[in-house]
Amino acid sequence: MSRNYKTIIIIILFLCISDYLYAWDFNIIGSIREIFDDNITSIVESPLEKKKYDFITEIRVGLGVRQEGKTYTLDLMGHVNQQIYSMYFGLTNNNQDVTLNLSKSFSELITFQITDIFTNYPEPDTFAALFGNTYGRMRYWRNGFNLTGTFEANKHYMIRIVYSNQFSKYFYTHTRQWYINNYISMNYSNQELKYSLNQGARIQHEVHWDSSNYSYLFYEYQWTKSFPGGVLQVHRPGIGYRHDFTKQLYIEGRVAPDIVFPPTIRRTSITAFGTQIYLSSGTPYDVSLYAYIMLGHNIDQRTNAALSFTYQNSVLANNADPTTNWQIQGTLSRNIIDKLMLTSSIFYGQAYLFTSKTTIRLFGFSISPAFEFTENISMSVSYSFTLNYSHISGQRIPGGYVLSNTTFLKQDTGYYRNRASIGVNASW
Protein backbone atom coordinates (compact mmCIF):
# COMPACT_ATOMS: atom_id res chain seq x y z
CA MET A 1 0.00 0.00 0.00
CA SER A 2 2.89 2.32 0.82
CA ARG A 3 4.41 1.81 -2.62
CA ASN A 4 1.06 2.56 -4.33
CA TYR A 5 0.64 5.67 -2.20
CA LYS A 6 4.04 7.01 -3.25
CA THR A 7 3.34 6.19 -6.89
CA ILE A 8 0.03 8.08 -6.82
CA ILE A 9 1.74 11.15 -5.32
CA ILE A 10 4.42 11.10 -8.02
CA ILE A 11 1.80 10.82 -10.79
CA ILE A 12 -0.23 13.72 -9.32
CA LEU A 13 2.87 15.93 -9.03
CA PHE A 14 3.86 15.09 -12.60
CA LEU A 15 0.39 16.00 -13.91
CA CYS A 16 0.48 19.27 -11.97
CA ILE A 17 3.76 20.38 -13.49
CA SER A 18 3.40 18.75 -16.91
CA ASP A 19 2.41 22.06 -18.52
CA TYR A 20 5.43 23.69 -16.91
CA LEU A 21 7.78 20.92 -18.01
CA TYR A 22 6.42 21.15 -21.54
CA ALA A 23 8.01 24.59 -21.80
CA TRP A 24 11.45 23.08 -21.30
CA ASP A 25 13.63 21.95 -24.20
CA PHE A 26 15.63 18.82 -23.36
CA ASN A 27 18.91 17.86 -24.98
CA ILE A 28 20.54 14.44 -24.57
CA ILE A 29 23.99 13.71 -25.94
CA GLY A 30 26.22 10.68 -25.83
CA SER A 31 29.57 9.64 -27.22
CA ILE A 32 32.04 6.79 -27.10
CA ARG A 33 35.63 7.05 -28.21
CA GLU A 34 38.89 5.17 -28.05
CA ILE A 35 41.98 7.14 -27.03
CA PHE A 36 45.68 6.36 -27.34
CA ASP A 37 47.88 8.26 -24.87
CA ASP A 38 51.67 7.83 -24.94
CA ASN A 39 52.34 9.50 -21.56
CA ILE A 40 49.38 8.80 -19.27
CA THR A 41 51.17 9.98 -16.11
CA SER A 42 52.67 13.15 -17.66
CA ILE A 43 56.17 12.33 -16.42
CA VAL A 44 59.61 13.59 -17.31
CA GLU A 45 61.29 10.48 -18.67
CA SER A 46 64.55 9.46 -16.93
CA PRO A 47 66.79 6.37 -16.67
CA LEU A 48 64.86 5.44 -13.52
CA GLU A 49 61.38 5.83 -14.97
CA LYS A 50 59.98 5.49 -18.48
CA LYS A 51 56.81 6.85 -19.99
CA LYS A 52 53.69 4.69 -19.88
CA TYR A 53 51.19 4.42 -22.71
CA ASP A 54 47.65 3.05 -22.69
CA PHE A 55 44.43 2.70 -24.65
CA ILE A 56 41.50 4.41 -22.95
CA THR A 57 37.82 3.86 -23.61
CA GLU A 58 35.74 6.92 -22.76
CA ILE A 59 31.94 6.87 -22.51
CA ARG A 60 30.29 10.29 -22.19
CA VAL A 61 26.65 11.07 -21.45
CA GLY A 62 25.15 14.53 -21.16
CA LEU A 63 21.75 15.97 -20.33
CA GLY A 64 20.76 19.57 -20.90
CA VAL A 65 17.61 21.63 -20.40
CA ARG A 66 16.70 25.06 -21.69
CA GLN A 67 13.79 27.36 -20.98
CA GLU A 68 13.08 30.73 -22.54
CA GLY A 69 10.66 33.21 -21.04
CA LYS A 70 9.71 36.73 -22.02
CA THR A 71 12.50 38.27 -19.95
CA TYR A 72 14.85 35.40 -19.12
CA THR A 73 16.71 32.40 -20.52
CA LEU A 74 17.86 29.43 -18.44
CA ASP A 75 20.34 26.78 -19.63
CA LEU A 76 21.55 23.82 -17.57
CA MET A 77 23.95 21.21 -18.97
CA GLY A 78 25.74 18.34 -17.24
CA HIS A 79 28.10 15.59 -18.38
CA VAL A 80 29.30 12.33 -16.87
CA ASN A 81 32.46 10.73 -18.30
CA GLN A 82 33.63 7.20 -17.61
CA GLN A 83 37.24 6.47 -18.59
CA ILE A 84 38.43 2.85 -18.65
CA TYR A 85 42.18 2.17 -18.94
CA SER A 86 42.95 -1.15 -20.60
CA MET A 87 46.48 -1.68 -19.22
CA TYR A 88 46.67 0.47 -16.06
CA PHE A 89 43.19 -0.17 -14.73
CA GLY A 90 43.98 1.65 -11.49
CA LEU A 91 43.71 4.95 -13.38
CA THR A 92 40.12 4.19 -14.40
CA ASN A 93 37.94 7.07 -13.22
CA ASN A 94 34.58 8.78 -13.41
CA ASN A 95 34.39 12.57 -13.79
CA GLN A 96 31.63 15.13 -14.10
CA ASP A 97 30.86 18.73 -14.99
CA VAL A 98 27.78 20.94 -14.71
CA THR A 99 27.17 24.35 -16.32
CA LEU A 100 24.38 26.79 -15.43
CA ASN A 101 23.59 29.93 -17.43
CA LEU A 102 20.82 32.35 -16.49
CA SER A 103 20.18 35.69 -18.19
CA LYS A 104 17.49 38.09 -16.98
CA SER A 105 16.31 41.42 -18.41
CA PHE A 106 14.62 43.68 -15.90
CA SER A 107 14.06 46.28 -18.61
CA GLU A 108 15.41 47.20 -22.03
CA LEU A 109 18.30 48.96 -20.28
CA ILE A 110 19.13 46.63 -17.36
CA THR A 111 20.22 42.99 -17.79
CA PHE A 112 21.98 40.45 -15.58
CA GLN A 113 23.70 37.19 -16.43
CA ILE A 114 24.76 34.43 -14.01
CA THR A 115 27.14 31.60 -14.92
CA ASP A 116 28.22 28.78 -12.65
CA ILE A 117 30.53 25.95 -13.79
CA PHE A 118 31.49 22.96 -11.64
CA THR A 119 34.13 20.44 -12.78
CA ASN A 120 35.56 17.30 -11.23
CA TYR A 121 38.30 16.14 -13.59
CA PRO A 122 41.16 13.62 -13.19
CA GLU A 123 43.57 16.01 -14.94
CA PRO A 124 43.43 19.41 -16.69
CA ASP A 125 41.21 19.24 -19.77
CA THR A 126 42.56 22.34 -21.54
CA PHE A 127 46.01 23.77 -22.19
CA ALA A 128 45.16 26.89 -20.17
CA ALA A 129 44.17 24.75 -17.14
CA LEU A 130 47.37 22.69 -17.47
CA PHE A 131 49.62 25.76 -17.62
CA GLY A 132 51.60 25.85 -14.36
CA ASN A 133 51.57 22.12 -13.57
CA THR A 134 55.04 21.04 -14.66
CA TYR A 135 54.64 17.26 -14.43
CA GLY A 136 52.54 14.51 -12.93
CA ARG A 137 48.80 13.91 -12.84
CA MET A 138 46.62 16.37 -10.97
CA ARG A 139 42.95 15.78 -10.18
CA TYR A 140 40.93 18.83 -9.21
CA TRP A 141 37.53 20.08 -8.13
CA ARG A 142 36.63 23.56 -9.28
CA ASN A 143 33.58 25.76 -9.04
CA GLY A 144 33.51 29.06 -10.86
CA PHE A 145 30.74 31.63 -10.40
CA ASN A 146 30.32 34.80 -12.46
CA LEU A 147 27.73 37.59 -12.19
CA THR A 148 27.55 40.35 -14.83
CA GLY A 149 25.24 43.34 -14.74
CA THR A 150 24.79 45.72 -17.68
CA PHE A 151 23.21 49.18 -17.33
CA GLU A 152 22.60 51.22 -20.49
CA ALA A 153 22.12 54.91 -19.82
CA ASN A 154 21.57 55.58 -23.54
CA LYS A 155 22.83 54.31 -26.89
CA HIS A 156 26.25 55.93 -26.30
CA TYR A 157 26.99 55.16 -22.64
CA MET A 158 26.93 51.87 -20.74
CA ILE A 159 28.16 50.58 -17.35
CA ARG A 160 29.17 46.95 -16.89
CA ILE A 161 29.74 45.41 -13.42
CA VAL A 162 31.26 41.95 -12.94
CA TYR A 163 31.82 39.78 -9.86
CA SER A 164 33.62 36.42 -10.03
CA ASN A 165 34.38 33.68 -7.50
CA GLN A 166 36.37 30.51 -8.07
CA PHE A 167 37.28 27.78 -5.58
CA SER A 168 39.68 24.98 -6.56
CA LYS A 169 40.93 21.94 -4.65
CA TYR A 170 43.79 19.82 -5.98
CA PHE A 171 44.91 16.21 -5.56
CA TYR A 172 48.23 14.93 -6.92
CA THR A 173 49.36 11.50 -8.08
CA HIS A 174 53.14 11.37 -7.84
CA THR A 175 55.48 9.20 -9.82
CA ARG A 176 58.36 7.10 -8.59
CA GLN A 177 60.79 9.68 -9.98
CA TRP A 178 59.21 12.43 -7.86
CA TYR A 179 59.79 10.47 -4.66
CA ILE A 180 63.36 9.61 -5.72
CA ASN A 181 64.17 13.25 -6.47
CA ASN A 182 62.86 14.34 -3.07
CA TYR A 183 64.82 11.57 -1.35
CA ILE A 184 68.08 12.50 -3.14
CA SER A 185 67.67 16.20 -2.35
CA MET A 186 66.42 15.34 1.17
CA ASN A 187 63.59 17.78 0.67
CA TYR A 188 60.95 17.18 3.32
CA SER A 189 58.65 20.01 2.28
CA ASN A 190 55.58 19.73 0.13
CA GLN A 191 54.86 23.13 -1.35
CA GLU A 192 52.23 21.99 -3.84
CA LEU A 193 49.01 23.94 -3.98
CA LYS A 194 46.25 22.25 -1.98
CA TYR A 195 43.45 24.72 -2.66
CA SER A 196 42.88 28.28 -3.84
CA LEU A 197 40.07 30.83 -3.59
CA ASN A 198 39.90 33.64 -6.11
CA GLN A 199 37.50 36.58 -6.00
CA GLY A 200 37.37 39.43 -8.43
CA ALA A 201 35.35 42.60 -9.07
CA ARG A 202 35.33 44.79 -12.15
CA ILE A 203 33.54 47.97 -13.21
CA GLN A 204 33.67 49.21 -16.78
CA HIS A 205 32.40 52.48 -18.27
CA GLU A 206 31.85 52.19 -22.03
CA VAL A 207 31.41 55.00 -24.54
CA HIS A 208 30.04 53.83 -27.90
CA TRP A 209 31.09 56.41 -30.46
CA ASP A 210 29.32 54.70 -33.34
CA SER A 211 28.30 51.23 -34.44
CA SER A 212 31.94 50.24 -35.10
CA ASN A 213 33.92 51.85 -32.26
CA TYR A 214 33.76 52.02 -28.51
CA SER A 215 36.27 52.74 -25.76
CA TYR A 216 36.11 52.14 -22.04
CA LEU A 217 37.68 52.83 -18.67
CA PHE A 218 37.83 49.94 -16.22
CA TYR A 219 38.98 49.10 -12.73
CA GLU A 220 39.57 45.50 -11.72
CA TYR A 221 40.42 44.03 -8.33
CA GLN A 222 41.60 40.44 -7.78
CA TRP A 223 41.98 38.71 -4.42
CA THR A 224 43.52 35.24 -4.32
CA LYS A 225 44.12 33.09 -1.25
CA SER A 226 46.29 30.00 -1.70
CA PHE A 227 47.31 27.21 0.63
CA PRO A 228 50.22 26.93 1.00
CA GLY A 229 50.96 30.50 0.10
CA GLY A 230 49.03 33.48 1.29
CA VAL A 231 46.91 36.31 -0.09
CA LEU A 232 47.75 37.96 -3.41
CA GLN A 233 46.02 41.22 -4.37
CA VAL A 234 46.08 42.89 -7.76
CA HIS A 235 44.64 46.34 -8.57
CA ARG A 236 44.23 47.05 -12.27
CA PRO A 237 42.95 50.48 -13.46
CA GLY A 238 43.10 50.77 -17.23
CA ILE A 239 41.64 51.66 -20.61
CA GLY A 240 40.35 49.61 -23.51
CA TYR A 241 39.19 49.98 -27.08
CA ARG A 242 37.32 47.89 -29.66
CA HIS A 243 36.97 48.44 -33.39
CA ASP A 244 34.78 46.45 -35.75
CA PHE A 245 36.37 46.51 -39.19
CA THR A 246 33.34 44.65 -40.55
CA LYS A 247 30.46 42.71 -39.01
CA GLN A 248 32.76 39.68 -39.02
CA LEU A 249 36.22 41.14 -38.19
CA TYR A 250 37.08 43.03 -35.00
CA ILE A 251 40.01 43.84 -32.74
CA GLU A 252 39.93 44.64 -29.02
CA GLY A 253 42.73 45.65 -26.68
CA ARG A 254 43.21 46.94 -23.16
CA VAL A 255 46.18 48.06 -21.13
CA ALA A 256 46.71 48.89 -17.45
CA PRO A 257 49.29 48.99 -14.68
CA ASP A 258 49.23 45.90 -12.48
CA ILE A 259 49.63 47.05 -8.87
CA VAL A 260 50.56 43.79 -7.17
CA PHE A 261 50.59 43.14 -3.42
CA PRO A 262 52.22 39.70 -3.03
CA PRO A 263 51.70 37.40 -0.03
CA THR A 264 53.50 38.63 3.07
CA ILE A 265 53.68 35.18 4.72
CA ARG A 266 57.11 33.56 4.61
CA ARG A 267 56.90 29.83 4.04
CA THR A 268 59.75 27.82 5.54
CA SER A 269 60.60 24.13 5.75
CA ILE A 270 63.49 22.09 7.11
CA THR A 271 65.69 19.93 4.89
CA ALA A 272 68.99 18.14 5.33
CA PHE A 273 70.71 21.20 3.93
CA GLY A 274 69.14 23.71 6.30
CA THR A 275 66.05 25.87 6.23
CA GLN A 276 64.29 26.61 2.95
CA ILE A 277 62.62 29.99 2.74
CA TYR A 278 59.99 30.64 0.08
CA LEU A 279 59.60 34.33 -0.64
CA SER A 280 57.67 36.33 -3.21
CA SER A 281 59.24 39.21 -5.12
CA GLY A 282 60.59 40.59 -1.84
CA THR A 283 58.82 43.96 -1.99
CA PRO A 284 55.59 45.09 -0.27
CA TYR A 285 54.13 45.86 -3.69
CA ASP A 286 55.17 45.93 -7.32
CA VAL A 287 53.93 47.76 -10.41
CA SER A 288 54.13 46.11 -13.82
CA LEU A 289 52.27 45.96 -17.10
CA TYR A 290 48.95 44.33 -17.92
CA ALA A 291 48.12 43.99 -21.62
CA TYR A 292 45.45 42.15 -23.57
CA ILE A 293 44.67 42.09 -27.27
CA MET A 294 42.27 39.91 -29.24
CA LEU A 295 41.60 39.56 -32.95
CA GLY A 296 38.37 37.82 -33.90
CA HIS A 297 37.11 36.98 -37.38
CA ASN A 298 33.86 35.32 -38.39
CA ILE A 299 35.18 34.98 -41.91
CA ASP A 300 31.92 33.57 -43.25
CA GLN A 301 29.13 31.30 -42.15
CA ARG A 302 31.53 28.37 -42.37
CA THR A 303 34.61 29.78 -40.66
CA ASN A 304 35.33 31.31 -37.26
CA ALA A 305 38.79 32.24 -35.92
CA ALA A 306 40.18 34.04 -32.85
CA LEU A 307 43.66 34.92 -31.60
CA SER A 308 44.43 36.51 -28.22
CA PHE A 309 47.49 37.63 -26.23
CA THR A 310 47.57 38.30 -22.47
CA TYR A 311 50.39 39.60 -20.26
CA GLN A 312 49.60 39.77 -16.53
CA ASN A 313 50.49 39.03 -12.91
CA SER A 314 48.49 36.23 -11.31
CA VAL A 315 48.54 32.99 -9.36
CA LEU A 316 48.27 30.18 -11.87
CA ALA A 317 45.45 27.73 -11.34
CA ASN A 318 47.66 25.01 -9.86
CA ASN A 319 50.65 26.86 -8.41
CA ALA A 320 50.85 28.55 -5.02
CA ASP A 321 53.21 31.37 -5.99
CA PRO A 322 52.62 34.66 -7.85
CA THR A 323 53.86 34.75 -11.43
CA THR A 324 54.40 37.20 -14.24
CA ASN A 325 53.09 35.30 -17.23
CA TRP A 326 52.01 35.73 -20.81
CA GLN A 327 49.83 33.51 -22.98
CA ILE A 328 48.88 33.22 -26.64
CA GLN A 329 45.74 31.33 -27.58
CA GLY A 330 44.26 30.69 -31.01
CA THR A 331 41.19 28.80 -32.20
CA LEU A 332 39.86 27.97 -35.65
CA SER A 333 36.72 26.17 -36.78
CA ARG A 334 35.67 25.66 -40.39
CA ASN A 335 33.09 23.72 -42.36
CA ILE A 336 35.29 22.28 -45.11
CA ILE A 337 32.31 20.77 -46.88
CA ASP A 338 28.64 20.54 -45.94
CA LYS A 339 29.08 17.64 -43.49
CA LEU A 340 32.77 17.93 -42.59
CA MET A 341 33.81 20.29 -39.75
CA LEU A 342 37.41 20.99 -38.72
CA THR A 343 38.31 22.54 -35.34
CA SER A 344 41.80 23.29 -34.04
CA SER A 345 43.50 25.24 -31.25
CA ILE A 346 46.99 26.37 -30.34
CA PHE A 347 48.44 27.60 -27.01
CA TYR A 348 51.75 28.93 -25.76
CA GLY A 349 52.34 30.15 -22.21
CA GLN A 350 55.41 31.30 -20.31
CA ALA A 351 55.67 32.26 -16.65
CA TYR A 352 58.33 33.11 -14.09
CA LEU A 353 57.87 31.94 -10.49
CA PHE A 354 59.66 34.35 -8.16
CA THR A 355 59.81 32.06 -5.12
CA SER A 356 61.35 29.03 -6.81
CA LYS A 357 63.22 31.03 -9.49
CA THR A 358 61.67 28.86 -12.15
CA THR A 359 60.64 29.61 -15.72
CA ILE A 360 57.90 27.35 -17.07
CA ARG A 361 56.75 27.03 -20.67
CA LEU A 362 53.84 25.15 -22.19
CA PHE A 363 53.08 24.59 -25.85
CA GLY A 364 49.93 22.78 -26.97
CA PHE A 365 48.25 22.03 -30.27
CA SER A 366 45.06 20.13 -31.13
CA ILE A 367 43.11 19.35 -34.29
CA SER A 368 39.84 17.49 -34.75
CA PRO A 369 37.87 16.82 -37.96
CA ALA A 370 34.26 15.62 -37.56
CA PHE A 371 31.93 14.16 -40.17
CA GLU A 372 28.16 14.37 -39.79
CA PHE A 373 26.34 11.27 -41.01
CA THR A 374 22.89 12.53 -40.04
CA GLU A 375 21.51 15.48 -38.10
CA ASN A 376 22.02 13.56 -34.85
CA ILE A 377 25.00 11.26 -35.46
CA SER A 378 28.62 12.16 -36.28
CA MET A 379 32.10 10.68 -36.10
CA SER A 380 35.22 12.55 -35.03
CA VAL A 381 38.97 12.01 -35.04
CA SER A 382 41.29 14.12 -32.89
CA TYR A 383 44.98 14.60 -32.12
CA SER A 384 46.70 16.76 -29.52
CA PHE A 385 50.34 17.43 -28.66
CA THR A 386 51.68 18.90 -25.40
CA LEU A 387 55.21 20.07 -24.57
CA ASN A 388 55.74 21.07 -20.92
CA TYR A 389 59.14 22.48 -19.92
CA SER A 390 60.71 24.13 -16.85
CA HIS A 391 64.07 25.83 -16.17
CA ILE A 392 65.39 26.56 -12.66
CA SER A 393 67.88 29.38 -12.03
CA GLY A 394 70.60 28.86 -9.43
CA GLN A 395 74.23 27.97 -8.82
CA ARG A 396 75.15 25.43 -11.48
CA ILE A 397 76.87 22.22 -10.47
CA PRO A 398 78.01 19.27 -12.63
CA GLY A 399 75.48 16.82 -14.01
CA GLY A 400 72.89 19.38 -15.10
CA TYR A 401 71.85 20.29 -11.52
CA VAL A 402 71.62 23.63 -9.73
CA LEU A 403 71.63 24.63 -6.07
CA SER A 404 68.36 26.52 -5.54
CA ASN A 405 66.77 27.33 -2.17
CA THR A 406 69.44 25.15 -0.53
CA THR A 407 68.24 22.15 -2.55
CA PHE A 408 69.89 20.32 -5.47
CA LEU A 409 67.47 20.27 -8.41
CA LYS A 410 67.61 19.36 -12.08
CA GLN A 411 68.08 22.59 -14.02
CA ASP A 412 66.02 21.66 -17.09
CA THR A 413 63.15 19.21 -17.12
CA GLY A 414 60.25 18.61 -19.44
CA TYR A 415 57.99 16.09 -21.10
CA TYR A 416 55.94 15.75 -24.23
CA ARG A 417 52.65 13.96 -24.69
CA ASN A 418 50.66 12.75 -27.69
CA ARG A 419 46.98 11.81 -27.61
CA ALA A 420 44.91 10.51 -30.53
CA SER A 421 41.29 9.39 -30.53
CA ILE A 422 38.41 8.25 -32.70
CA GLY A 423 34.78 8.30 -31.60
CA VAL A 424 31.10 8.43 -32.44
CA ASN A 425 28.80 11.20 -31.15
CA ALA A 426 25.00 11.31 -30.94
CA SER A 427 22.47 13.91 -29.77
CA TRP A 428 18.70 14.04 -29.39
Image (tube, helix red, strand yellow):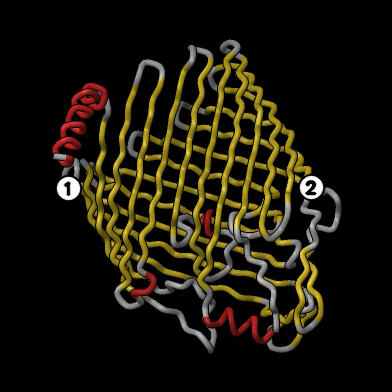
Foreground residue, 177 or 353? Answer: 177
Pointer 2 residue: 261
Residue 338 x/y as whole percent = 23, 41
Mark 2 lies on a secondary structure that is strand
Quadrant of the snapshot with the N terminus: top left
Q: Residue furthest right?
A: 283
Q: Residue furthest front?
A: 1
Q: Residues within 10 Å of mark 1 (few under 14, many from 20)?
A: few
Give the residue at x 65% y 34%: 201
* Mark closer to the chain start, 2 or 1: 2
Residue 39 x/y as whole percent = 43, 73
Q: Amino acid at mark 1?
A: Phe
Q: Are marks 2 and 1 in contact (CB under 8 Å)?
A: no
- The numbered mark at residue 373 is 1
Give the residue at x 20% y 37%: 6
Cα separation, mark 2 vs mark 1, equals 55 Å
Q: Is residue 358 above or below residue 264?
A: below
Q: Residues within 10 Å of mark 2 (few under 14, many from 20)?
A: many
Residue 77 x/y as whole percent = 35, 40
Q: Is residue 156 above or below residue 336?
A: above
Foreground residue, 306 or 393? Answer: 393
